[in-house]
């Protein structure tokens, strides 16, 4: 009996992996919804992009044009140019329409914002299950899900209220890995091509990963001519999928030759790349050196054509002014490399990717000389690339953690059973637990909790408290007592202002609107009279500030005698008339007198 029960359990796991994966997802989703119900109730959209995403959906449901993504509630009357697509709006809008007849508009939005981010997690889990079953063992996906939950940077992108596009792009990344590991060439190539096209139609954040996936498939064909079908299918789906994504989802603003979204610039690159890859895979010369030469030639044509036809895109894709790049974009924390961040943030993010890379390389070494080597090699290369991306920007952390799951699972699949089978009880109990915690990356976060390096300093705590309180529903809703007007406020507070109140703002942290962002910066760091002039030019009738908000610390540091620094010291110009807010409000409000 002792041997029969485990084998039946293993057979059940192996046979019904799809059903079990969906059940596991439902369990995770139900727990997250229960655990974060307070955030759902208070519409706690913590990121500016989440707030703007909801405003974009509201505009769509109110009749705003499908291809018009202008945000008219900021920088009136022209509005702000938002360079996103409608892809991620669709599930949110659909859920709102489903719930609205039963619970009303307000609760429909809350429920949609709570549920929608968890939808792509189901696809991600299916993709991970497929990958680890193919690479490790039929039952390994259960362990992979546990390790996946330890990658908190990645999991945060799927949690309730995280409604922006990052979760969907991580899902496309998981599908890309599944396609790379797929033994069926046509299906694997199609999955990689479609996933890349969808990801780029959403946004260009995953462009480096898409390029790496294409390079891996090309090198795979260079090495093995039998991989031609995989490469051809990838090329067709990449080019065709990108063209379809552009036709269906590219906004009016993205019809221009811009470098920061799927515009005609990148569409032409993807279509040409797909055509070149398809042609050379179709010809598929027998000699490996000839195939390598064709691949190099195709790469040279793509790069050379890009440099020749789109020289404006050779720098940063955002295309912002030197001043905006220096004063804002270069100081965005998530755009800094991982070594530029405090230990308490960097180590927990990097722990799982490092373990995953070690596991992938170990699995690759063990598979040498076998058919499994060709399955592990593309996954190991992709994992290594993701880890290197952390040295560029810490925003690569969620992708690196997700891509680390197969390698970390392979490592745990070997080490944990060895510990459990050891004759020493200490190794069986403590060793297996310690091994899992280290491999999953959870040990780093647990250890840092008890070290000084893992604690946020007092200033950081004050800033975090101000960020949360000022953006809360009670604080913001108090502003609806006043007639609709244009409120001059911080860049990072603008999206939250328009979500929770009927007022208009000036700017949001979106690079295509550099003039509006710089106006806010100049207004707060310049002289009081300069602020008054800029505010009047924007038609602002009220000034709204949040003392100790992260953005305000920048104003005070840059201009110690500037307008905001004077406000913070209680030096208020006579033309600012204080407007009372409820007791305990973290916000400060003034009426601007232009007489």
Image (spheres, rainbow, N blue to C red):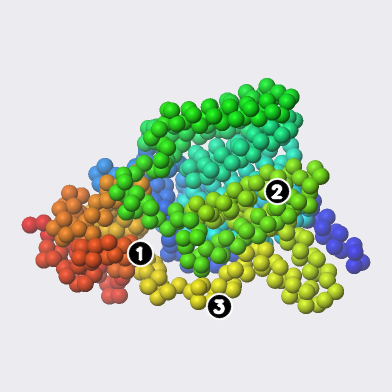
Q: CA distance from mark 1 to mark 3?
A: 26 Å
Q: Quadrant of the N terminus?
A: bottom right
Residue 378's place in the image compared with 185, above or below, is below
- Seen as rendered, the residue at the extreme left is 595
Disc 2 is placed on an element classified as helix
Disc 1 is placed on an element classified as helix
Nearest the viewer among 444 and 496 is: 444
Where residue 312 is drawn, which disc sits there?
none
Judge the density around disc 2: few (<14), some (14-19), many (≥20) Cα neighbours within 10 Å: many
Residue drawn 47% across the image and 34% down it:
266
Q: CA distance from mark 2 to mark 3?
A: 36 Å
Where residue 550 is drawn, which disc sits there?
1
Judge the density around disc 1: few (<14), some (14-19), many (≥20) Cα neighbours within 10 Å: some
- Seen as rendered, the residue at the extreme top is 283
Which residue matches tag 2? Answer: 131
Residue drawn 63% across the image and 47% down it:
382
Closer to the chain start, of discs 1 and 3, is 3
Where residue 450 is drawn, which disc sits there?
3
Q: Is residue 112 left or right of residue 9?
A: left
- Between circles 2 and 3, the one closer to the viewer is 3
Q: CA distance from mark 1 to mark 2?
A: 41 Å
């Amino acid at each position: 009996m002792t041997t029969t029960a485990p084998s039946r359990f293993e057979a059940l796991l192996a046979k019904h992996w799809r059903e079990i994966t969906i059940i596991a997802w439902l369990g995770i989703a139900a727990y997250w919804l229960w655990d974060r119900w307070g955030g759902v109730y208070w519409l706690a959209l913590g990121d500016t992009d989440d707030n703007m995403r909801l405003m974009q959906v509201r505009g769509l449901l109110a009749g705003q044009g499908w291809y018009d993504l202008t945000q008219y509630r900021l920088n009136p009357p022209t509005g702000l140019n938002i360079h996103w697509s409608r892809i991620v709006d669709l599930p949110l809008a659909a859920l709102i329409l489903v719930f609205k007849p039963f619970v009303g508009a307000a609760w429909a939005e809350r429920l949609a914002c709570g549920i929608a981010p968890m939808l792509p997690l189901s696809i991600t889990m299916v993709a991970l299950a497929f990958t680890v079953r193919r690479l490790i063992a039929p039952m390994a996906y259960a362990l992979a899900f546990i390790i996946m939950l330890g990658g908190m940077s990645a999991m945060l992108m799927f949690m309730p209220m995280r409604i922006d596009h990052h979760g969907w792009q991580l899902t496309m990344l998981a599908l890309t890995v599944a396609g790379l590991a797929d033994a069926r060439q046509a299906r694997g190539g199609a999955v990689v091509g479609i996933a890349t096209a969808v990801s780029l139609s959403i946004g260009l954040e995953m462009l480096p990963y898409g390029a790496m996936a294409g390079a891996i498939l090309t090198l795979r064909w260079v090495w093995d001519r039998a991989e031609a079908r995989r490469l051809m299918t990838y090329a067709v789906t990449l080019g065709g999928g990108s063209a379809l994504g552009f036709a269906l989802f590219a906004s009016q603003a993205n019809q221009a030759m811009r470098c920061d979204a799927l515009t005609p610039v990148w569409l032409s690159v993807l279509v040409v790349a797909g055509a070149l890859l398809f042609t050379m895979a179709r010809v598929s010369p027998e000699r490996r050196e000839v195939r390598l030469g064709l691949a190099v030639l195709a790469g040279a044509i793509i790069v050379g054509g890009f440099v020749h036809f789109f020289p404006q895109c050779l720098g940063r894709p955002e295309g912002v002014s030197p001043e905006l790049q220096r004063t804002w974009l270069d100081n965005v924390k998530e755009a800094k490399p991982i070594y530029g961040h405090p230990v308490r943030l960097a180590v927990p993010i990097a722990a799982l990717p490092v373990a995953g890379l070690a596991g992938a390389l170990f699995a690759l070494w063990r598979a040498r000389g076998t058919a499994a080597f060709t399955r592990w090699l593309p996954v190991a290369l992709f994992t290594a690339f993701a880890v290197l991306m952390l040295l560029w920007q810490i925003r690569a952390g969620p992708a690196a953690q997700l891509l680390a799951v197969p390698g970390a699972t392979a490592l745990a699949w070997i080490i944990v059973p060895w510990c459990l089978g050891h004759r020493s009880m200490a190794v069986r109990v403590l060793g297996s637990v310690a091994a899992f915690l280290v491999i999953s990356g959870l040990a780093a976060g647990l250890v840092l909790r008890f070290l000084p390096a893992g604690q946020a300093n007092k200033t950081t705590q004050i800033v975090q408290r101000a960020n949360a309180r000022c953006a809360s529903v009670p604080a913001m809703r108090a502003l609806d007592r006043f007639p609709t007007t244009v409120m001059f406020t911080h860049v990072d507070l603008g999206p939250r202002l328009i979500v929770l109140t009927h007022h208009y703002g000036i700017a949001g942290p979106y690079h295509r609107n550099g003039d509006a962002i710089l106006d806010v910066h100049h207004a707060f760091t310049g002289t009081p009279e300069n602020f008054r002039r800029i505010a009047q030019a924007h038609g602002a009738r009220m000034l709204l500030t949040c003392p100790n908000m992260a953005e305000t610390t920048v104003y005070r540091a840059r201009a110690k005698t500037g307008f905001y620094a004077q406000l913070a010291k209680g030096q208020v110009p006579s033309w600012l008339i204080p407007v009372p807010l409820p007791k305990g409000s973290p916000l400060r409000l003034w009426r601007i007198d232009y007489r």
